C-alpha cells in the first residue's frame, strides 16, 4: 500500500474519507472551505447537479479599488463565512452540510463556519 508522503497527500486522503460521508443536494448544499497560504475561499455546492450555488473569498479583485481587505486572516475568514451566508439567504438556502475539505476544524476553517452560522446558515 502506498503511503502518503506529504501534508497535501494526507489532506487529500482525509478529504476522500470525508466526502464518502458528506454529500450536498439542492435543498441542503455542501459548504466547502479551501485555505491557501494567503486567502480563504468558501462555496455552496449542489452535488446532484454539480453546480456552485454561492461562493465567497477574501481576495480583492485587481480591477477594484486596488486596496486589499484589512484584518488578520482569521478575521477575513469570518467575513467570508458571513458573506457566503448572505449570498445563500438571497438564493433561498437556509441549511447546509459542512465539508472541512480535509483540514482540521480550527483556525480559519472554524472561523468560516462560525461566520456562516452568525450570518444565518444552519448546519
Image (spheres, helix red, strand yellow):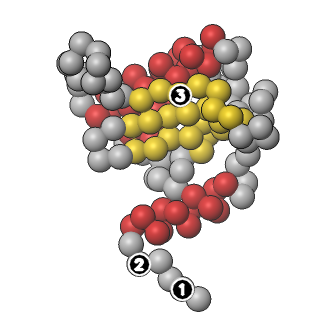
Does dot 3 land on a helix, a strand or a loop?
strand
Foreground disc of the pair 3, 2 = 3
Does dot 1 land on a helix, a strand or a loop?
loop
Where is residue 68, by image quadrant? top left
Q: Are marks 1 and 3 in contact (CB under 8 Å)?
A: no
Number of numbered markers = 3
Distance from label 1 to label 2 (Cα)? 9 Å
Estimate the x, y position of residue 39 in percent, counting from the top left.
Answer: 33, 38
- The N terminus: image quadrant: bottom right
Does dot 2 land on a helix, a strand or a loop?
loop
Q: Residue lying furthest front in this view?
A: 63
The answer to whether residue 24 is visible is no
The answer to whether residue 65 is visible is yes
Dot label at residue 5: 2
Dot label at residue 2: 1
Few, some or many C-alpha atoms within 10 Å of disc 1 (few <14, some 14-19, many ≥20)?
few
Image-based side of 2 in relation to 93, left or right: left
Q: Sequence-wise, which precedes: disc 3 or disc 2?
A: 2
Image-based side of 118 in relation to 108, left or right: right
- The C terminus: image quadrant: top right
Estimate the x, y position of residue 40 in percent, counting from the top left.
Answer: 39, 37
Few, some or many C-alpha atoms within 10 Å of disc 2 (few <14, some 14-19, many ≥20)?
few
Residue labelled with disc 3: 55
Q: Sequence-wise, which precedes: disc 1 or disc 3?
A: 1
Which residue occupies 64% across, 62% down?
17
Question: In this rendering, is residue 73 above or below 22?
Answer: above
Few, some or many C-alpha atoms within 10 Å of disc 3 (few <14, some 14-19, many ≥20)?
some
Amino acid at each position: 500500500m502506498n503511503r502518503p508522503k506529504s501534508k497535501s497527500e494526507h489532506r487529500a486522503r482525509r478529504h476522500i474519507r470525508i466526502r464518502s460521508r458528506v454529500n450536498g443536494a439542492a435543498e441542503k448544499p455542501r459548504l466547502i472551505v479551501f485555505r491557501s497560504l494567503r486567502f480563504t475561499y468558501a462555496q455552496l455546492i449542489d452535488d446532484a447537479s454539480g453546480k456552485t450555488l454561492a461562493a465567497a473569498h477574501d481576495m480583492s479583485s485587481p480591477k477594484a479599488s486596488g486596496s486589499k481587505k484589512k484584518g488578520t486572516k482569521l478575521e477575513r475568514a469570518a467575513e467570508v463565512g458571513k458573506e457566503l451566508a448572505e449570498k445563500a439567504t438571497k438564493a433561498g438556502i437556509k441549511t447546509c452540510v459542512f465539508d472541512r475539505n480535509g483540514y482540521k476544524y480550527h483556525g480559519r476553517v472554524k472561523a468560516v463556519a462560525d461566520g456562516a452560522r452568525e450570518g444565518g446558515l444552519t448546519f
